[in-house]
Every structure is written in structure tokens, then in C-alpha cells.
Amino acid sequence: MPAAPIARDPEEAARRLRVGQLVALPTETVYGLGANALDPAAVARIFAAKHRPHFDPLILHQADTDRTLNYARSVPRQARQLAEACWPGPLTLVLPRRADIPDLVTAGLDTVALRVPAHPLTLSVLRAVDFPVAAPSANPFGFVSPTTAAHVAEQLGERIDYILDGGPCRVGVESTIVAFQAERVVVLRKGGTPVEQLEQLLGHPVEVRTQSSSRPQAPGMLSSHYSPGIQLSIRAGAPVQDGSRERAVVCFGPDRPGGPHTFNLSPTGSLEEAAQRLFGVLRQLAAGGYGAAEVELVPDYGIGQAINDRLRRAAAPPA
């Protein structure tokens, strides 16, 4: 099929979603590949375009808290508390599913992942349609997530129907995913809402359980993911040396080497900047013809936990 048009027209994006087409949508985290979540044929096109395995569930997006939580069969008190505090924003809640949500969306699980994205263009699209939009990241399964419309066009442009251009993503890593099991709050994927923020809002610690699974409860739980297509190795405390054509270096913070084959996620030491730049840097490695790259982890707090999670999964060998 011809390459998908790229434009800033939310009305056209909504029209295409209504007729079962695939539309790439900007969010504050990454670009998502959207389809009508209540149309199994449209949802099946998401899996086909991404070559995504059917055991990996999708996230449903809606425009406000009440409409979004309406797709859950029940909503625990702590889930509503987090929704009201964090939406719109980079937080996904896993809740008991409503019966009319297709099994393909939930991978046959009895739960559904829900969120309200914080991007004005996509919120206007969601307000214009009378169904939730299923939207995983708009990239081939297992590869680097897209944070610009050009990234989407590069990898999926000929497999989808339309790309809504909302500029670069503000956060740059996917949403945090939280589930509720009895009285426990469990983080299934670290992301744009830091664990510390969740604990502060709830007034107690949360459990973190982001291990891989052949039947994951949420997206992003597989041990190998976000691959740039070259071998990455995590540095283990050795001083950072400048990169080379054979082996690039990804580092973080001031006083690091600055050669042409060294990629600093944030020379100023900003974790927020590092998150915004992360997937773009991984794409530069993929496009640069490097044989391998050494990666320095960032400080492991706040959104740094999500950055390190993505780096470790990008460095993991394929399952």
C-alpha cells in the first residue's frame, strides 16, 4: 500500500478510525498505533502491521477518566485515586475487563489496560469518536518505540493508513503500568510516572513485578524488547571511554567523552532529557552502522528507573 500521509488533522484521524483504519497517534510518551478497540477486524490489523504476538495485550485509550474507567467491570478505590491524580498522563491501570471488549485486545485475559493520554491532538481525536482506541507503540514488535512522526513513517509508513503529527513526544518512554491484586498495588512496567510518585500519592510502598512472561499481564514485560538491531552491553562501573566506529558508547551526564561515536543522553545530567532522547539515540545507533555499543546506565531513581529498564531490555538477547 502507499505510504501513509502525515498531517496535523485530528478530524481526519477520527474519520479514519471510524471506518476501521490504522492511525498513528502522538501521546506524551511515544506514538501509538490506534484502531477502534471494539472492532476485532481493526484490532487484528494492529497485530498484523506490527507483527505483534497475540499473547501481548493492548492498552485502551479514552479522553477522560469517567469514560475510560467505564470499560472496567469494577474499579478499586486505589485505582480511582491514581486515575484522578495522574490522568491525563503516563499511567496505565490494569482492571477487570468489561465483557464487550474483544479477547484480541486483552489477549484473552480477564483484565484490560486503560489510560488517558496527555496530548491535545490525540485527546481531540478521542473526544470525536464513540469508542475506545487500542494503541500499542507504532513500531514493529520488539524494536525501538517511535517518538516522532518521522520514526513511525520510517518503520510502518507502508503498513498503516494515516499518521497524525503531534511533534516530538514530551516524556519519551512509555506509561507506567499498575495492577491491583487484593489490597496490593503492583507495578508491571516502569514508565513515565515514577514509582516514587505513586507511593507518595498512595501513602504506602508498592510492589514492583516487571519480570518477563510468555503470557504477560501487560505490554512491555518481555525480557527482550526495544532492540535497535545491534548488540548492546551494559557497562559495569568501568570509566567511560570514547566510542569508535566498531563500538559506539551511550553515556549520561557531564564530564563524559564527546567524540562522534559517543551519544550522551543528557550532557547536563537531566533524567527528563535522557528519557526524551533515549529512543532517538537507539535509532541513531541502528542507523549508524555500528557493530555494537556499550551503554552506561543512568541514576536509578525517578524516571531513571524506566530508562534503565528500557536499556536492559534492549541489551537482552532475543528470547
Image (tube, helix red, strand yellow):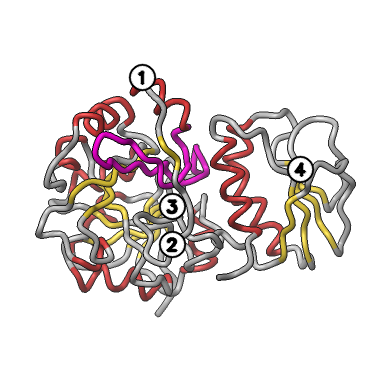
x 25%, y 26%: residue: 81
Helix, strand or loop under label 3: loop
Instruction: Read off the residue under disc 4.
Output: 251
Q: Nearer the viewer, mark 3 or mark 4?
A: 4
Number of residues whose C-alpha sits closer than 10 Å to that of mark 2, classed few (under 14), some (14–19) or many (20 or more): some
Q: Mark 2 or mark 1, which is nearer the start of the sequence? A: 1
Is-magenta flag for residue 57? no
Q: Position of residue 240 (x, y in %)?
A: 86, 43
Instruction: Read off the residue under disc 1.
Output: 203
Q: Mark 2 or mark 3, which is nearer the start of the sequence? A: 3
Q: Mark 4 or mark 1, which is nearer the start of the sequence? A: 1
Q: Nearer the viewer, mark 2 or mark 4?
A: 2
Helix, strand or loop under label 1: loop
Instruction: Read off the residue under disc 2.
Output: 213
Are discs 3 and 4 less than 8 Å apart at CB? Answer: no
Instruction: Read off the residue under disc 3.
Output: 31
Marks 1 and 4, Cα distance to the nearest angstrom? 34 Å
Is 205 placed left or right of 272 in the picture? left
